[in-house]
Amino acid sequence: MSMTDPIADLLTRIRNAQSAGKPTVGMGASKLKVAILKVLQAEGYIAGFGVDSTGAKSTLSIELKYHDGRPVIDRILSIELKYHDGRPVIDRIERISRPGLRIYRGKDELPKVLGGLGVAVVSTPQGIMSDKQARAAGTGGEVLFVVQ
């Protein structure tokens, strides 16, 4: 079964892991997820992440599904969550553009989250970047989600 919105799945796993107080969360890796996590790490919302490319032999306790003798998930993504005084650094993480309703904004119309204290993650022709980086590059794009 294919996943219709891997970005929403990533955000939900981060949200659930932080509400449960987990230090790390694991999932299947993709180039899109890695690009999103690079932005979150650069903005200081996660402590770090790593990609384990060993395939089915993983130290994480994730049950892999197989199709035609091959693992469906061949790369595991591990995210280190960040806490400050026992509270998650991410207060709110919300999907904006979704498969049923894409939201595109020009460089002058990109949202400012909490007056610049939060971050909007934008998919631009130059790649995935924060709203501040997109404004500096002079480009707009699809507003994927916001983080506060």
Image (cartoon, rainbow, N blue to C red):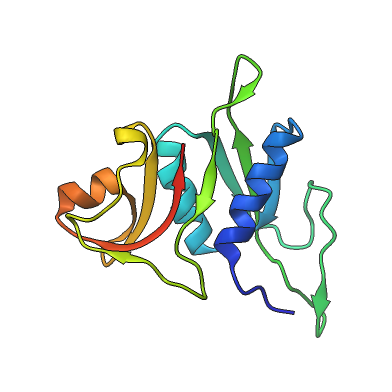
Q: Is residue 29 visible?
A: no
Q: Is residue 125 visible?
A: yes
- Image-based side of 139 in relation to 25, left or right: left
Nearest the viewer among 113 and 10 is 113
Query: Residue 97: horizontal and vertical position, in percent?
Result: 45, 64
Q: Residue visible at 46% across and 38% down? A: 41
- Image-based side of 25 in relation to 29, left or right: right
Residue furthest out toward the top: 85
Nearest the viewer among 28 and 89 is 89
For the N terminus, which image quadrant?
bottom right
Relative height, residue 86 to residue 18 (above, below): above
Query: Residue 76: horizontal and vertical position, in percent?
Result: 67, 55
Residue furthest out toward the bottom: 68
Q: Residue visible at 46% across and 36% down? A: 148
Image quadrant assignment for residue 57: bottom right
- Image-based side of 11 in relation to 134, left or right: right
Query: Residue 13: horizontal and vertical position, in percent?
Result: 68, 49
Nearest the viewer among 78 and 58 is 78
